[in-house]
Amino acid sequence: MRQIELIERQLREAGGVASVLATGWESFELIGVLAADSAEKAADMYPAFMFARGAAVEGRNAIVLAPSMPAGGPASFGSPELSTSDVEEVADALAGLASALSARLREAALLAADDGDRIACENAARDADQIGELLARSA
């Protein structure tokens, strides 16, 4: 769960559209890896995690098309380690990350001077919203 906290901090500290795009790419990558890993651990949440993984791939792909995405893209961080085996805790943490990601992408869309960046941010924000909806627990 430490990786989720670190990427959320990077999202908060990201300055400028390019930085938000790069951190957004990393966020979607992390969500995808953790969702796939968690799906195998909880049959009852398998569909939600797998659909969230699909939305993470879509969001990452939207960001890659942005003109201001740094060349070469961010490095993949491999297989993250979870400090918990509680899949509901992981789902909550990923839903929180997705919410923060959506907010930052929407802010970046407003700041984007290039239409391609704006569209990429808006599309990726919708994917982040979908992840949040899939993984958030009902009250």
Image (cartoon, grey):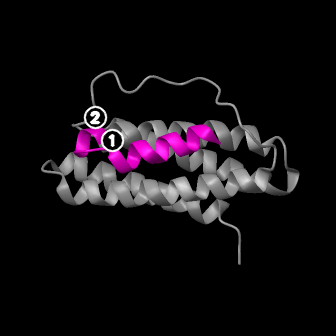
Residue at image x 32%, y 60%?
A: 106
Classify 129 as above or below 38. below
Q: Would residue 134 appear left or right of 65 to someone viewing this image?
A: right
Q: Residue furthest right?
A: 43
Q: Is residue 9 magenta?
A: yes
Task: Tell me the residue at 28%/59% (across/down).
Answer: 107
Residue on which disc 1 sits: 21
Instruction: Indicate the amino acid at tag 1.
Output: Leu
Q: Mark on residue 9?
A: none
Other residues around mark 2 within 10 Å, as few (<14) / some (14–19) / many (≥20): many
Separation (CA) of disc 2 from disc 1: 6 Å
Residue extending furthest toward the left:
113
Residue 32 image point, x, y percent = 60, 40
Q: Nearer the viewer, residue 71 or 119?
A: 71
Label 2: which residue? 69
Prevailing secondary structure class for the magenta stretch in the rendered image:
helix
Left or right of residue 41, residue 51 in this image? left
Residue displayed at 18% across by 51% down = 112
Name the spot of residue 31 as percent of width and height, x first.
Answer: 58, 43
Q: Position of residue 70 (x, y in %)?
A: 27, 29
Image quadrant in which you'd find residue 65: top left
Above/below status of 103 relative to 121? below
**x, y percentage for residue 115?**
17, 51
Looking at the rendering, the stretch of residues picked out in magenta corresponds to: 1-19
Q: Are marks 2 and 1 in contact (CB under 8 Å)?
A: yes
Residue closest to the eye, 27 or 67: 27
Is disc 1 placed on a helix, strand or loop? Answer: helix
Quadrant containing the C terminus is: bottom right
Quadrant location of the N terminus in the rendered image = top right
Asked if residue 43 lies left or right of residue 87, the reply is right
Question: What's the amino acid at mark 2?
Answer: Met
